[in-house]
Image (cartoon, grey):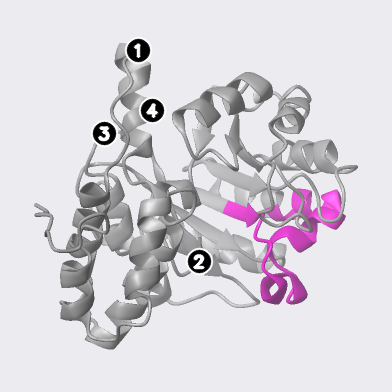
Amino acid sequence: MEGVIDALTRDLLTREAGFDWTVTEFVRVVDTRLPPRVFYKHCPELTNRPVATASGIPVHLQLLGSDPKALAENARQALALGAVSVDLNFGCPAKLVNRHDGGASLLRRPERVYQAVKAVSEALEGQIPVTAKIRLGFSDRRLAVACAQATQAGGAARLVVHGRTRDEGYRPPAHWEWIGRVRQQVSIPVVANGDIWTLEAYWKARTLSGCRDVMLGRSALADPWLAPRIRHWQRTGERLPETTWPMRASVIKEYAHLQRQHLPDRVVVSLVKQWLAQMRQGNEEANQHFQRVKRLTDLDTLLKSLVIDTAHPEAAVSCH
């Protein structure tokens, strides 16, 4: 979720009970030990004790790279700065990242996944956990199990599996049953990820994968109340009402308010539109609002426009 899930977003998404932990955007590791300022930029929560959002939800630091030595050095740096966990990204499908030998590109050779995890695990000496995220392969699924086993052999304590290959990108469907095949071949906990947009999808993903836990990415942005809805259902068996547009708009307005305290309005406008573009996925009302405001360039005008009722344009909806 590079460029999307920053510290402010993590704060907003964890204000309602739902998440057990969060993960940062990846820190890109090439061939050198990065200075502390890079880690603080990606994970400002490192200045807190515990390293968590304002609501107390742990924040895990993610590294992306392919050089075992460089990853190990930066894992030590993360540990020195107080990181509570180091997650390794072998799932990013971005072409630029893959061309530079990062993310899902390593899934073509499970041995490279193993060496990367092993180097980080040895560097941390068990002081904090090492976790990993993979996809079901690069071009096909033939090496999915081997890559998962490589993370375990290298010392990973937990594995997130996105239910698609790199070449499948984010095209539906996510193959939750394949996550189940992977889970059966390793002994570490496996977390299911991909296409969990609703409460029904959550239960189906768990059922088909056999995984106890799931990870939300784009869907948490699309519906900030999805995780709380899942948690409420887990605890009570009751289904909360669907998220309304005023609820979504209130999150966007709070996000803009927080961002404009340290960013120019023109940048905040772009960030707000980016989040709105995520919200419109699977929600026609959000899509209508996005289409109406996508060409606006003034932040105050954009935010004011968010509270217009598209069904009754003359009436404004109050958001608190």
Q: With 281 as the anchor, is 99 left or right in this view?
A: right
Picture coordinates of residue 231 (x, y %)?
Answer: 34, 26
Mark 3 vs 2, N-terminal side: 2
Span of residues in magenta: 88-116
Picture coordinates of residue 19 (x, y %)?
Answer: 36, 37
Disc 4 packing (10 Å; few <14; some 14–19; many ≥20) = many
Q: Residue at (48%, 54%) from the top-left corner?
A: 281
Picture coordinates of residue 268 (x, y %)?
Answer: 28, 78
Inspect the image, locate mark 4, and give the three-letter code of the amino acid beneath it. Ile
- Asked whether the residues under the numbered discs 2 and 1 touch, taking CB atoms below 8 Å apart as contact, a structural biologist would say no
Is residue 104 a member of the stretch shown in magenta? Answer: yes
Inspect the image, locate mark 1, and give the three-letter code of the amino acid beneath it. Gly
Mark 2 vs 1, N-terminal side: 2
Q: Residue at (33%, 21%) from the top-left corner?
A: 239
Q: How far apart, in angstroms, are the residues tagged by discs 1 and 4?
A: 10 Å
Inspect the image, locate mark 3, and give the three-letter code of the amino acid beneath it. Ala
- Asked whether the residues under the numbered discs 4 and 3 touch, taking CB atoms below 8 Å apart as contact, a structural biologist would say no
Q: How far apart, in angstroms, are the residues tagged by discs 1 and 3?
A: 16 Å
